[in-house]
Structure formats: structure tokens, C-alpha cells
Image: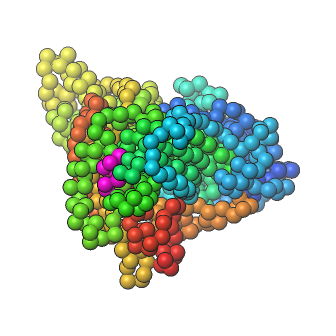
Amino acid sequence: MDYRDRYVQGKGKYIDDLHFDDMLYMNVVRSPYGRAKIRNVKGGLNASELKLFYKSSMGEMASLGGSSNSVYLEPVFAIDRVNYEGQAVAAVFGKTRYEAEDLLSTVSVEYEPLDAVSSIESGLKSGPIHEGTKDNVLAKSELGEDFDDNDVDFDLTLEDEFFNERIIANSMETRGCIAIYKDSMLTFYVSTQSVQSVKGGLAQALKLKPEQVRVIQADTGGAFGVKGSFYPEYVMAAYASMKYGKPVKWIETRTEHLQAAYPGRGAKAKIKIYARNDGKITGIKGDVYVDAGAYDAGTGSFASRFIAYQITGPYHIEKAYMRAFSVLTNKAPMGPYRGAGRPEAAFFMERMMDLLADRLQMDISEVRLVNASTEPFTSPTGLTITEPTRPFLEKALEAVNYRKVSMEEKTGLAFFVLIPASRPGESARIDVSDGKVVAQLGGNVHGQGHELFVKDILGNSLQVEQDLISLSNGDTSLMESGVGSWGSRTAIAGASALAAVAEKIKQQVIDKYGKYSPEKLLSGNYSAFEFLNIDYDVNSVNFNMITAERDSNNTVRMKDWYSYYDLGHVLSPVNVVAQITGGTLEGVGQMFSESLRYSEEGQLMTTSITDAGVLAADYAPNLHIKWVENGSPAPDRAKGLGEAPTIGTPAALARAIELVTRNRVKNTPIKLEDLAKL
């Protein structure tokens, strides 16, 4: 059965579809306060028994810098105080889901509410939320070299401030896991983007040997970054299975997802540019802040640096100096959301480009062309652009017929860099038996359709009918190492690794028979594994154009969406269109409605998926998708894609909206109800 038919027919096996004999169901008692002391906890499994801290890392991204102070680590269960609404205080276990729900009332917690830090601004001004620390700055860094006005050639300066509110992923399937501890072996089923990171987290937290932990990925119903992190609930379930000797299942409710899953965005910037009257930007300075939440988990400690690192985008700006601050607040820890720093940087830079064009009365395309490069360069913050960007922009403007469209429509542009998380590479495995070819990738599929390019690659390489090829979910017992699926990396790293393994399999057949044939392959048993190292960046430049209008209800909405993306080498055109369509809709949601909102007391005011602003399908624009293939240095010559629409859409749409409303757009989201009034 084709994988798409399997899901459409409801035959997928997600976490909540898995059942084991004598299984316990876990529910979590969570803090109703943004910040409070815990005077007493009675009932349930809590910190009096399980006093552990856990680590959550996003692999290669963590190398960009951040905090290493253990005082900022989150405990599995709150110890002495809670620091965000939804923080876990205790867990209960019932024989049924309903019994576990009822058991929540048997736990009593005595709180002493404290003043909460509810914003970046209050985090910088307030006393520290963690005892033994001097302030609420989790991490800070400087990029580039500082300069003063005498060091730069300019005719004018422009300054502005921007803010992207927090967004939670709200994938169709919430988080979930099943832990089974038996005979000193922990088997852990999970909805995830990386079985390897979950395995590492469990072994570290519970002091288990790696060979004692097996992590198996169930079918995963969407992720968008939120399932790339390691969470305290995983430790609770695993510990409970070890304690009670029974399987333990946890399925997150939508309310818990809004409260305690790691949200993305939550970034603020103050930007100043120095420019000449011809539109050339000669210098940029700024401060970037992110709302890191209450603990050093997810991406909070290095997100601000990553945004600042790529602030110049595809533009050759000779002087840049950025300061980056990750600020602690009484909210759930910050995590990755599709793009994870890339959309924020593009939004800040592209908004300044539009402001400069308006000040100089230049066309928005011309100011971008003036600043695009005619040769490869490395920015003052260290961002490497390996190809000239001006020729690409010129071709993009022509491909989308910008001159004509912009004369007739309210039009916005976004020219941006996509930095895929290609390092340190990825793993793949192929097993052949019973006339079937089964592949596995180190980065786990969670709805992107990796099955399509896997069938194409192996069908072409091994000359096998695609019906005989399948992609299995991640299983650490079969994969000695791997990274994960995030950061637009799988087509680059995972597919290249898969192609390398296919060559190993072919060589095994040749070694046995003296030559290769698909018949000889399918008649035997073969197995091969490869971790393909990638120690270089595969950055690419991309382009979006968007038009907007008022509809019959006087509400501003997107009309047409255009792309001109450099995809290196396309593995699956069907996948490309699907990835672009989904990413575009997420970018539209960020611009028009999606956010998590908190009161000054740190109370989450977003109480449902509807409140979170997830848009209905009728907000989808008309898509005009174009791409080019300028091969990358990766073995399969692919470049990144998955995050590109979420990077370009908000930045370009902001310009189109402000042309319709005649109001400067500096923040996301712009609420739909407000747009009807403008």
C-alpha cells in the first residue's frame, strides 16, 4: 500500500493507536501560575521522589553559543517553585485515560504566587527569576565589530523596532510517548523528529547506558520543530515504567500543548542602518532579543545569536555590529518553530530595506539590487554567501514579472538567505530481504513525504520497482547514530547518505556475484549503514513576491504568492510543491493571526487552537511556484527548502499589507480584526 493511501485510509499507527497489556496512562499536574513558590505537594509522583534535571539540545545549532549554567536547567518536576504556567508539578497514573484524569484531583499543591516576568522588557528590568543569578539574561553575545559614525560613509541613518510574537506549532497530532521498561531495557515509542536525541536525553536523565535504551518512532502527525526537542514528560513516563514495571502512555492535550510545548519566534529587534543617497547600505547596528522562557531548554540560549548572525541576509554590507540577548521570562522555554531564527532575521532586514526605499523614494526592488552582491562574500557577522546574489535577484524579478505586477497590485518583496542545518551530516540504512527494500533515515519523517524521494533515489540507483521500496520510521536499535529532521536538512544530508548506502548495497551484490542486477539483489539478504559527514554550509538565496488586497468584507488578505527558489537539485517535484504550500500557509498565519498571548501575571490567555490563530484554508493565496537548480556542493547537489516559505512570506506580505492599509507594519501578527479597521 502506498504510504499516502495508508494515511488517507486511517491505517497509520500513531502513538495513541498503540496499546500494550496492563498499560498505565499518565496525566500531569501543572502549575496554574506564571511564577510561584511551592509550599507543599501531596500526592502523585513529584520532585520529592524524582528530583532530576534534563537537558534539551537541538544538535548542531547549539554550537552557535548559549548558556551552560546548570542553574538554568529545568527540573523534570518543579522543585520549590514554578516558573511558568503549565510547568509540571506532579504526575498521576491510572489504568484508563479517564481514571488518570480523575486522579488529578487527588493531588494537592499549595502555592504562594509571586510577581511574574511576562515580557522581554520586564525581564531586562526585573530582578532575576532564578535564585543565585544576577539578572534575567540567559545568554548574550556580540557579532561583528563596533564602529562609530566616522568609520562609515553615509548620507542618512534610519532606525526602527520590530517584534514577532511567540507561536506554537499546533501540529495535528500533539506530543506523546509510551515507555516500556523490562529486563533492564527501556523501549520508548515517541512522536518525534529525532529518535537519537530522545535516546540521548533519556540515557542522560535516568543514568542509563545507551545500550539500555531503544527509541522507536511511531507515525508522527506533524511537528514543525516542536517535536525536535526533548521534554520532561518523556523522563516522567520512562521513570514510571521503571518504577511500576508496566507500560506507561502519555498523550498531550491541546491545552497542555499551548501551555508547555516549546514555542518559537518571540523575537524583538532594534535596528539602525547607515546608507548613502544611492540606496547603498554601508553599515548596520542593532540589538536582537528573544524571549527564552524560564529555562535553558530548546533553542532559547542561542536563538538570539543565530538571528543576529544572519541579519545582513543576501546583502553585502561592509560594516555590521550586532548584540544578541536571550532573556528569561516566566513562560515555557523557547523552542524551534519552522525557520527557527531565519524568518525573524529576514523580517527585520527586509522591513529596513522597505523603509530605506520609502525614505529615498526608490523602488523596493532597486534598493535591494543596489545592496545585492556581484561576488561571493562573508558578512561581518560571519555569514558566508558562496555565490553572487545580484544576478539571482535580477533573474527572480524577471521570472515573476515584477515590473508589471507591481504597477497593478500592492506588492511586497523578500530576498533572503536559507541556512540549512546541514552539519554534521546524516545517516541512512538499507535492508534487503524477502524481495523488499527497506530504508531508514537518521532524520525522521513527520509528514513531509520523504517516502517519495526515497523511492525515487533507490528506484533509480538499485533499478528496483518502487512498490518494493519503503521507508520505515526511526528505530535506534537499527541505527547506531543519526541527527534529526529539521532545519531544511534532509534533502541535503539524509538523501545524500541514502545514495551512499545504495552504492554500498550494490557493491555487496557485486562482491558476491561479480556483477550487479536487481534480480540478484532481491533474491538475497543485504544490509548497509552510512553516516555521511558534511562539514560545510549549503546556504542558498531565495526570493518571494506577494500581492495583497481588501476583500468584500473590508479585510486585508493575501492575493497572489510568487516564489523563485534555488533548490540545487530537486529530488521530488511533488514534494517541493507540497512543502512550499504548507510553509506558505504557516507564514500567512504568522503575519495575520497566530500567536501566544500572556497577561502581565504570566497567565496564558491563548486557551484553544482557535485562540492561537490557526487560519482556515480559505486564507490560502494563489500560488505561482518557480524554482531553479544551481547545484550545491552536497553529494546529491540539493539545497534546502522546507523553511523557505516561512522565511519569505511574512517579510514580503508585510510590505503588501502596509501598501493596502498605508500603515507601517513592524510586528507580527497583525490581527485580522484590526486590519478590517485600517
Return the x and y of residue 247 as percentages of the image width and height.
Answer: 59, 43
Q: Nearer the viewer, residue 678 or 494?
A: 678
Q: Nearer the viewer, residue 568 or 26?
A: 568
Q: Residue furthest bottom?
A: 552
Return the x and y of residue 562 as percentages of the image width and height.
Answer: 29, 59
> Quadrant location of residue 484?
top left
Image: 270 above or below 404: above
Examine the rendering and report whether any part of residue 574 can be seen. Answer: no
The verdict on residue 356 being magenta is no
Return the x and y of residue 253 as percentages of the image width and height.
Answer: 59, 59
- Left or right relative to 19: residue 437: left
Q: Nearer the viewer, residue 156 or 484?
A: 156
Name which residue lies at 48% across and 35% down.
381
- Left or right relative to 232: residue 448: left
Image: 56 above or below 665: above
> Quadrant location of residue 76?
top right
Which of the colour schemes (rainbow, by chain, secondary structure, one colour) is used? rainbow
For the stretch drawn in magenta, what is the main secondary structure?
helix
> Quadrant location of residue 317?
top left
Examine the rendering and report whether any part of residue 397 can be seen. Answer: yes
Name which residue lies at 42% across and 83% down.
553
- Left or right relative to 112: residue 641: left
| Residue range (magenta) | 365-371
Return the x and y of residue 44 as percentages of the image width and height.
Answer: 76, 49
